[in-house]
């Protein structure tokens, strides 16, 4: 049965109807289970002793069916299995989901199919199984190349296990990425430079490098509130870590194409580019978010966050909830996400989405301060402005 669409807000404009094609169309699958909960993690992840993978595969298939009745047949540019720890999925579960997606949408010739993997929960047999199922890109949660810091971060794998998993991944998939967290407790700038140099030497064409942030509702957040999380860098030291990271990655031919993501030219994450370029993406799984343009209206979509309830609800009415977005909502989201990219955004596209123009005086002011660069139709934040990205975006949003 087709999901009833809510009434669009008064400021919705027909410009949204085809605008999503500028960013493409993706499918995000959220696997909510982990072997343990990391103390810094505020994602929707849960520890479960037993998982009925056949029931979960069926639930994903049912929800994909529902979304597809709404979108109709489109070209699918990317699929991303995120979590949680998707490498806890059996290869046949992944295969079943991909087969159902292929029933409804036309896979692009260069479709990117990514699976996030925890180095402590994978082996060569699973990697080969994922590749056979159709996965062509893996993202490894390495997080650190220091055993003491891995334990501090609550990670269950060792450096040796992480390097072994990376070696297997690079021998199995054409495209491999891995994550590292920096500005950790008691980490010196010199030790990070050495660790990053070692990471670069591992030969990955894509790396995601995140500065440790303390989020409310996490174990680290609780410790920080009690004054028990010591040795964190202050704001100035954090800026030094960021600057060194940018310099080293650029010198290695892996510039930041997004605030925290670095890649050799042509190996950027196609799925994440859909988010940052205001494309459409279907979010399926507990707590998954999405953006879908249906008719003349763009919708924010959400799903039930609790795993057991989500799986049960998928059997009958489904979990998809839709909220229509107004034209300014769409424009501000494009501004917020798009300016994270080194390549910037299209000013004319932004103004068409908003049905308004950014005040010329504000553009001139930020340009004179060296915060932004405007060349023809391309608006981007400069290297100088990047550490102040949120403030720059706030200034531009207020000028619309």
Image (spheres, grey):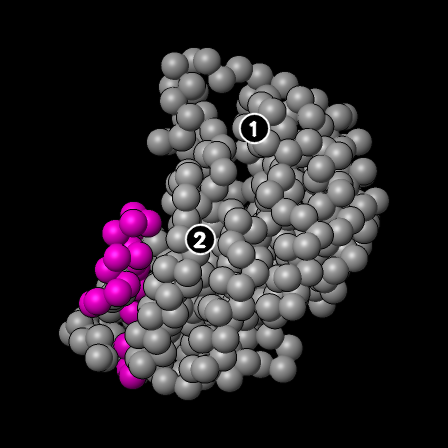
Instruction: Say which quadrant the C terminus sits in.
Output: bottom left
Instruction: Name the residue at 22% across, 79% down.
Output: 1
Tag 2 residue = 31
Q: Give the range drawn in magenta.
A: 295-317
User: Residue 151 occupies which quadrant of the picture?
Assistant: top right
Label 2 sits on a secondary structure element that is strand
Give the image location of residue 274, x and y in percent. Answer: 51, 67
Residue 263 visible, this angle: no
Q: Is residue 136 left or right of residue 374?
A: right
> Would you place residue 212 above or below residue 297 in this image?
above
> How many angstroms separate mark 1 from mark 2 (CA)?
21 Å
| Closer to us: 260 or 10 | 260
Q: Residues within 10 Å of mark 2 (few under 14, many from 20)?
A: many
Please say whether residue 270 is one of the residues in the magenta stretch: no
The image's mark for residue 12 is none
Q: Mark 1 points at which residue?
A: 153
Horizontal side, residue 379 vs residue 5: left or right: right
Q: Residues within 10 Å of mark 1 (few under 14, many from 20)?
A: many
Is residue 175 visible to the viewer in this orientation of the structure?
A: yes
Closer to the N terminus: mark 1 or mark 2? 2
Q: Percent from the top left, x then y, of residue 178?
A: 66, 48
Residue 126: x percent and y percent?
64, 55
């Amino acid at each position: 049965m087709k999901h009833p669409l809510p009434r669009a807000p008064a400021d919705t404009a027909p410009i949204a109807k085809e605008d999503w094609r500028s960013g493409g169309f993706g499918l995000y699958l959220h696997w909510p289970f982990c072997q343990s909960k990391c103390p810094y993690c505020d994602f929707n992840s849960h520890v479960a002793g037993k998982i009925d993978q056949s029931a979960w595969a069926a639930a994903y298939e049912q929800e994909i069916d529902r979304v597809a009745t709404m979108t109709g047949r489109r070209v699918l540019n990317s699929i991303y299995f995120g979590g949680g720890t998707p490498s806890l999925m059996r290869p046949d579960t992944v295969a079943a989901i991909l087969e159902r997606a292929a029933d409804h949408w036309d896979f692009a010739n260069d479709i990117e199919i990514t699976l996030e993997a925890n180095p402590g929960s994978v082996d060569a047999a699973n990697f080969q199984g994922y590749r056979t199922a159709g996965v062509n890109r893996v993202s490894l949660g390495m997080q650190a190349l220091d055993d003491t810091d891995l334990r501090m971060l609550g990670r269950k794998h060792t450096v040796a296990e992480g390097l072994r998993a990376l070696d297997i991944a690079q021998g199995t998939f054409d495209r491999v990425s891995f994550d590292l967290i920096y500005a950790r407790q008691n980490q010196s700038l010199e030790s990070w430079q050495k660790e990053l140099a070692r990471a670069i030497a591992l030969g990955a064409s894509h790396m995601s490098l995140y500065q440790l942030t303390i989020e409310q509702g996490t174990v680290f957040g609780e410790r920080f509130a009690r004054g028990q999380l010591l040795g964190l860098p202050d704001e100035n030291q954090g800026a030094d870590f960021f600057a060194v990271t940018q310099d080293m990655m650029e010198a290695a031919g892996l510039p930041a194409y997004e605030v925290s993501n670095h890649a050799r030219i042509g190996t950027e994450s196609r799925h994440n580019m859909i988010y940052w370029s205001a494309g459409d993406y279907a979010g399926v799984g507990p707590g998954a978010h999405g953006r879908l343009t249906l008719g003349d209206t763009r919708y924010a979509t959400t799903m039930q966050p609790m795993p057991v309830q989500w799986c049960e609800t998928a059997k009958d009415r489904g979990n998809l909830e839709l909220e229509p977005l107004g034209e300014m909502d769409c424009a501000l989201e494009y501004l917020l996400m798009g300016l994270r990219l080194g390549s910037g955004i299209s000013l004319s596209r932004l103004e068409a989405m908003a049905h308004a123009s950014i005040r010329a005086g504000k553009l001139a002011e930020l340009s004179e301060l060296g915060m932004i660069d405007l060349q023809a139709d391309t608006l981007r934040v400069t290297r100088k402005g990047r550490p102040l990205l949120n403030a720059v975006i706030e200034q531009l949003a207020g000028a619309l």
